[in-house]
Image (cartoon, grey):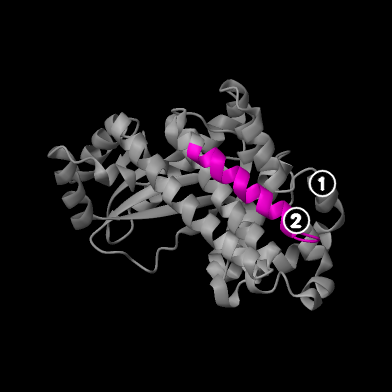
Amino acid sequence: MQRWRIELRHWAQTTAASYASRKGILGVIMGGSLARGQEWRHSDMEIGVLVDERDPQIPYFNINASRGVEVIQLERRELLEQMSLVDAGDLAPLRKWPIQLWKGRIVSDPSGVLGRFKRQFDAGLFSAEVISKRIEDQQAKITAALGEARALLAAQRPAAALVKLRGAMNDAILAFHWAHGELPRSQSRTDSRLHLICRKHSAPSFYALYREIYNLEGANRVIRTAWPTIREQVLEITRMWGDSARDFFDYAVDSHFAWRQNAGILTVYRLYVPVIGGEERGLINKLDDPGWAKDNSLLADFLGLDNVKQEQVAAWVGQLELTAESISRN
């Protein structure tokens, strides 16, 4: 086994075990590629912690040894109620359970609750009923986002409309995975992984549409020319998700673009940065202001939101709508 893999797995086990010893944590399950034995050199870690009630002192985004650690809090009473539903044949809870914890590895489970959760989740996530419902959920999000995009186009705000369209595209990617029995993984590798999956399932047009909507042809150029200047500005924007989010984007989303996943990492920035802070504080309300665009030309360029054409966004909205409907039917 490669040395990096041995060291990474040791780090993951030690980090997960450190949560098990914290006051108020009733159990720990390690998730993600590290739990499934599918890690790569730059894998971060997802863990689920069982608690009696959500603890605001445990942030979702964390950094440990320059790697991301996403901590998902599972409230005991709520989880027990959901598992009782599953035992009774109602698989609805599996639509909402965090997929990062599918096929997780139990680290600490004195009560046996997480073991029961794991058995139900591992067995049920890819059942026909759950897949159908997950695709249905994604389709509802796509429809809503495309409706918002059309409203913004009607208001002559094509850049903001493109932001909404990219959100819809992200949900379409998730639906595409479910429709083909694939587990969605690693947003930082969206481009390379989607390319492989689209080749596997003979869907090159879907991959091409994703690349167009996220304007990825010029990825290497903007990383080389714009990113060095606006990097700190972008990372400061992420603080609106909490101070820990800045470090998470810095380390776990590879702000140095060193992982050779440039297009995928750029996808993450272009998906989230414009909407961080919401409709009032976020960039989305400024993007179509000519004054703002002029003063922030490098940022707009990096985000692929400069010179956005109304007609092109409208065409993409129509294409994605048809594509999403096709995914839902299949």
Q: What residue is shown with label 2?
A: 304
The answer to whether residue 92 of the structure is visible from this angle is: yes
* Comes first in the chain, label 2 or label 1: 1
Q: Amino acid at mark 2?
A: Gly
Q: Residue at x 59, y 60 (%)?
A: 149
Residue neighbourhood size for the residue with mark 1, other residues' Cα within 10 Å, grouped as few (<14), some (14–19), many (≥20): few
Q: Residue at x 81, y 60 (%)?
A: 307
| Cα gap from disc 2 to disc 1, whole angstroms | 9 Å
Q: Residue at x 38, y 46 (%)?
A: 98
73 vs 35, left or right, is: left
Q: In the image, which residues are magenta? A: 305-325
234 vs 185, left or right, is: right
Q: Position of residue 104 (x, y in %)?
A: 36, 37
The image quarter containing residue 234 is bottom right
Q: Position of residue 211 (x, y in %)?
A: 70, 41
90 vs 65, left or right, is: left
The answer to whether residue 65 of the structure is visible from this angle is: no
The image quarter containing residue 269 is bottom right
Q: Position of residue 70 (x, y in %)?
A: 47, 52
What secondary structure do most residues of the magenta stretch adopt? helix
Q: Amino acid at mark 1?
A: Gly
**Residue 319 falls inside the magenta stretch:** yes
Disc 2 and disc 1 in contact, CB within 8 angstroms: yes
Q: Is residue 155 above or below residue 22?
A: below
In-front residue for pair 9/70: 70
In-front residue for pair 225/314: 314
The image quarter containing residue 212 is top right
Question: Regarding mark 2 in the picture, which secondary structure is present there?
Answer: loop
